[in-house]
Every structure is written in structure tokens, then in C-alpha cells.
Amino acid sequence: MHRRNLLRWIAVLPGLRTWAQTAGFPGDQADVLRALAATVLPSELGSEGIDRVATDFGRWVREYRAGAELDHGYGFTRIRRKGPSPAPSYLQHLAELRPALLTADSAGRRAAVLSALEQAKVAELPRTPGSQHVAADLMAFYFRGSDANDLCYRAAIGRDRCRGLQGSDNPPPPLKEKA
């Protein structure tokens, strides 16, 4: 009986370690994540919008569940699963970017991010956040979403939001200007 309990604990510990690493993301790197967001996201968002995206990205990382089933699409019967949590590598990337993002001017911050992306061999924006580099994944998180699409067209399109047919014959309303 004791051996079974020991084996159960051993089986649970890796998952517990992964949860512990993601539970507090971004932890003491929150200021670096906000500085990264301010560096790579459009300035049109303003400081509140940039903070909102950084907060939403942090929530996405914390709620990431390794091993969850991925959508397999129509006609594909093989079930794929999510990989391990990207939180540990994200924290490492943020720690490496900390000096430049918190002390350098805007040109120095951009240069540091570009250098980090080149070192990580990021050649294009990923379709979904993965764990290649926190900067690329933060950009993918925002630019592949509805809010970036709306900002691009300056209209409240709501591409990924469920809308009814009522009013679908009208063009989307323009975005509300910030006061």
C-alpha cells in the first residue's frame, strides 16, 4: 500500500512542477513583460491597451494546459496534443531581456528584441504562440487576434467573435476613438 502512494506522488510531481512554474507567470517579470509589450505592439493601443494585452497574454500562459487535445480539423482523424508549458522558457527569455527593456531607450529595446529573435531563429510570426521566443509569441497572441484585425481596418469587425445574422448586411461600425 505504501509503495502505491509513493508511486502516485512521483507520477504527480512533474505535473505539479509545471503547474507551479506557470501559476505565477509572469511573477517578478511583470514589468519586463509590459516593457516587451510596449516595444513590440502598436503604439496606437496606448498604455492601457498594451497593459491589457500583456495581462491577457500572462493569463493565457497561466491557463495553458500541457497535453490538452488540439483541434484536428475536418478530415484529420489523428488527435494531437499541446506540448509542455512555454512558461519556463518565457521566464528565461524575459530575464535575458530585462536589462535592455528596463534601461535602454526605444532603439536599444528594439535592437535587443531583434537580436533575441535572431538568436532564437524566429523567421516569421508563428500561427499560434508556442515557445520559440516570448517576443514572437506575444506578437502572435495579439496580431493573430480580433483586436489587431479591428485596429488594422479601423472598424469593429470582431473576426473571432460570434455574431448573429441580424445586421450582417451592414458594414462594421468604425472603431471608437480614444478620448
Image: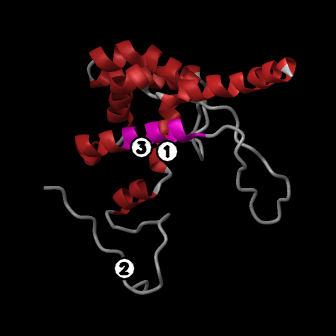
Instruction: Classify 170 as above or below 78.
Output: below
- x 81%, y 51%: residue: 79
Q: Secondary structure at mark 2?
A: loop
Which residue is the site of mark 3? 56
Q: Amino acid at mark 2?
A: Pro
- x 74%, y 61%: residue: 73
Q: Nearer the viewer, mark 3 or mark 1?
A: 3
C-alpha span from label 3 to label 2: 28 Å
Mark 3 neighbour density, 10 Å: few (under 14) some (14–19) many (20 or more): some
> 56 or 155: nearer the eye?
56
Q: Earlier in the sequence, mark 3 or mark 2?
A: 3
Dominant SS of magenta comes to helix
- x 79%, y 25%: residue: 8
Which region is colored magenta?
53-64
Image quadrant occupied by the N terminus: top right
Mark 1 neighbour density, 10 Å: few (under 14) some (14–19) many (20 or more): many
C-alpha span from label 2 to label 1: 26 Å
Q: Amino acid at mark 3?
A: Asp
| Left or right of 112 in this view: 131 | right
| Residue 164: x %, y % from top left | 47, 81
Which residue is the site of mark 2? 171
Which residue is the site of mark 1? 141
Instruction: Classify 146 as above or below 117.
Output: below
> 119 or 79: nearer the eye?
79
> 15 or 53: nearer the eye?
15
Check contact, mark 3 vs mark 1: CB within 8 A. Answer: yes
Q: Amino acid at mark 1?
A: Phe
Q: Which mark is residue 82?
A: none
Q: Is residue 132 magenta?
A: no
* Residue extending furthest toward the front: 1
